[in-house]
Image (spheres, rainbow, N blue to C red):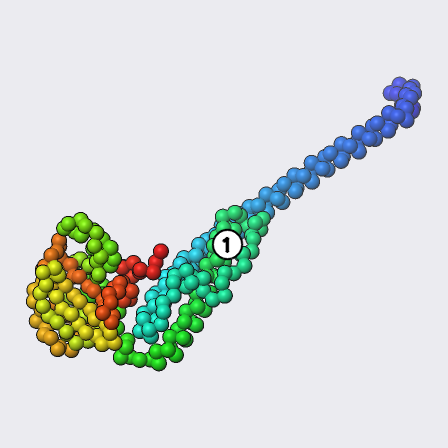
């Protein structure tokens, strides 16, 4: 290779073919490395933008799913209220009750496993989607179950209003007053002796003088005083039903033979008889047998249902 010189001289440089190949290869490698670095940076920027976009979308999705979950929870509470109504109608229609597990399973048994959202959304969003899917499925099956149950009840009852009106179905006190269940139906230690006994009623404690209400239509069968439950009233509701209200404040003014409507005030809450504090002892009988009064209370969510786990 000839190279011009400033003083007019020419100098000759000998460059081998191998050196040219190395130089060309170096240039090509440099260009490739520079290009790859640029591409990688571009890909990283694009990926970062995609991740940022996904985070924003997932945040919005989680917010939407949180609202959906709240709505599903609200609908579930309304559905539980309908389940209580269904139980009440079944008592009126003299149909057997259905256990809670069967009610939750609904019609057609369990559904297939929910679809997977892994890799498509964040783990937290995937969990919310899965929970929402399960809730939707449960509500759908329970709704179908209740629809079928109501239809069978309607055909069985033939809308017999007399049975409905004479079946105990409310609290013996207003749900708006201060009260609490001090003793449930079933085995319990005697509050005085400590010995185990069977408590054939429901004790509802409250303020002395609180109105005691008849829980269904009927006729006053007995107004008396007992050593254990003090002043009490017994009401015959026909269709085999009878209710008893004990530990009243004083002898009631109503008389045997008086006709009573559901919700009528029949006495005042007290602690006459063998009592540790002001409360009403409420008992429900049918055909001479005692039953858990909680199964005949449908106007209060404050008292836990005996069907709940």
* In-front residue for pair 70/98: 98
Number of marks present in the image shown: 1
Q: Kindly identify which residue carries mark 1.
A: 130
Please provide percent x and percent y for residue 199. Answer: 21, 58
Residue 257 vertical placement versus 72 (above, below)? below
Residue in view at x 21 percent, y 71 percent: 242
Residue in view at x 58 percent, y 48 percent: 119
* In-front residue for pair 130/168: 168
* In-front residue for pair 7/65: 65
Can residue 69 be seen here? The reply is: yes
Please provide percent x and percent y for residue 62. Answer: 48, 52
Q: Quadrant of residue 40?
A: top right
Q: Quadrant of residue 14?
A: top right
Can residue 209 be seen here? The reply is: no
Please provide percent x and percent y for residue 238. Answer: 22, 76
Residue in view at x 48 percent, y 52 percent: 128
Residue 135 vertical placement versus 235 (above, below)? above
């Amino acid at each position: 290779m000839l190279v011009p010189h400033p003083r007019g001289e020419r100098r000759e440089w000998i460059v081998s073919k191998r050196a040219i190949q190395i130089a060309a290869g170096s240039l090509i490698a440099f260009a490739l490395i520079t290009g790859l670095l640029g591409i990688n940076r571009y890909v990283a920027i694009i990926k970062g933008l995609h991740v940022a976009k996904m985070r924003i979308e997932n945040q919005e999705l989680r917010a939407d799913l949180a609202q959906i979950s709240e709505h599903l929870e609200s609908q579930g509470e309304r559905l539980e209220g309908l389940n209580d109504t269904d139980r009440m109608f079944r008592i009126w229609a003299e149909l057997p009750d259905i256990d809670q597990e069967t009610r939750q399973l609904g019609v057609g048994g369990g559904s297939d496993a929910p679809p997977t959202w892994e890799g498509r959304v964040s783990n937290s969003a995937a969990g919310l989607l899965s929970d929402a899917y399960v809730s939707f499925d449960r509500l759908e099956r329970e709704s179908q179950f209740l629809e079928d149950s109501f239809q069978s009840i309607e055909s069985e009852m033939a809308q017999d209003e007399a049975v409905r009106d004479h079946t105990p179905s409310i609290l013996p006190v207003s749900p708006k007053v201060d009260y609490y269940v001090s003793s449930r139906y079933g085995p319990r230690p005697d509050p005085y002796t400590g010995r185990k006994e069977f408590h054939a009623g429901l004790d509802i404690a409250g303020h002395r003088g609180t109105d005691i209400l008849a829980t269904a239509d009927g006729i006053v069968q007995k107004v008396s005083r007992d050593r254990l439950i003090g002043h009490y009233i017994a009401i015959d509701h026909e269709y085999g039903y009878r209710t008893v209200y004990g530990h009243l404040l004083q002898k009631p003014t109503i008389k045997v033979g008086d006709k009573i409507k559901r919700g009528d005030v029949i006495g005042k809450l007290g602690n006459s008889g063998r009592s540790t504090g002001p409360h009403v002892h409420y008992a429900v009988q049918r055909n001479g047998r005692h039953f858990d009064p909680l199964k005949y209370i449908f106007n209060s969510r404050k008292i836990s249902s005996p069907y709940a786990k």
